[in-house]
Amino acid sequence: MADHNPLTPAFAPFFGMAGIAFAMIGGCAGAAFGTAKSGIGISGIGIFRPELIMKSLIPVVMSGILGVYSLVVAVLIAGDMGPEKSYSLFQGFCHFGAGLTVGLTGLAAGYAIGNVGDSGVRAYMSQSRVYVGMVLILIFAEVLGLYGLIVALILNTKGGS
């Protein structure tokens, strides 16, 4: 082991794998919370106004996109890893940061989408003019997750081979 490079320690891939875990856990937890919370509101209005259900599914779709953001970052990180590839500590930290970024922003965006979706679809049941405002607020909440995806992609590019 005379030609061991100190910049590629054996534990470096741990940080990349931790980044994958944080991306998937945070992003999917945010997506699940947003889907569940807004689904409760949709179920509530379905009892009184079933014709509004299809138009009220926007928060659920937006929550699902957060899971896709996490999946994209996790697949990109995993593509840079492998037993035959050299993996530096810098790459590990960049991938860890990328996963943490997309995971935490997905969690925050899912929380926002869930709460806005629940209250928004209930308000839409009573007053149809609320719909455009609800969609705008949902877009701003979704953009938080998109910002995390963009930063994660930049970090992944810096840490890539």
Image (cartoon, grey):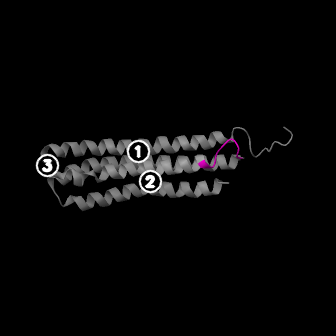
**Residue 159 x %, y %:** 65, 53
Q: Quadrant of the C terminus?
A: bottom right
Query: Is 69 positioned to the left or the right of 48 in the image?
Result: right
Look at mark 2 in the image and give the residue it sits on. 145
The residue where tag 1 is placed is 30
Q: Are marks 2 and 1 in contact (CB under 8 Å)?
A: yes
The residue identified by callout 3 is 49
Q: Quadrant of residue 84?
A: top right
**Residue type, numbered disc 2:** Gly
Using a 10 Å C-alpha cutoff, classify the residue at mark 2 as few (fewer than 14 neighbours), some (14 to 19) or many (20 or more): many
SS at circle 2: helix
- Of 156 and 132, nearer the camera is 156
Confirm whether the magenta stretch covers residue 103.
no
Image spot of residue 6 (x, y percent)? 79, 44
Depicted 20 relative to depicted 147: above or below = above
Q: Given the image, on which type of amino acid does mark 3 rest? A: Arg
Q: What's the magenta bit mostly, secondary-structure-wise?
A: loop
Q: What separation in Å lies between label 2 and label 3 (alpha carbons)?
A: 31 Å
| Disc 3 secondary structure class | loop
- Amino acid on which the number 1 mark rests in the picture: Gly
Q: Which of marks 2 and 1 is nearer the N terminus?
A: 1
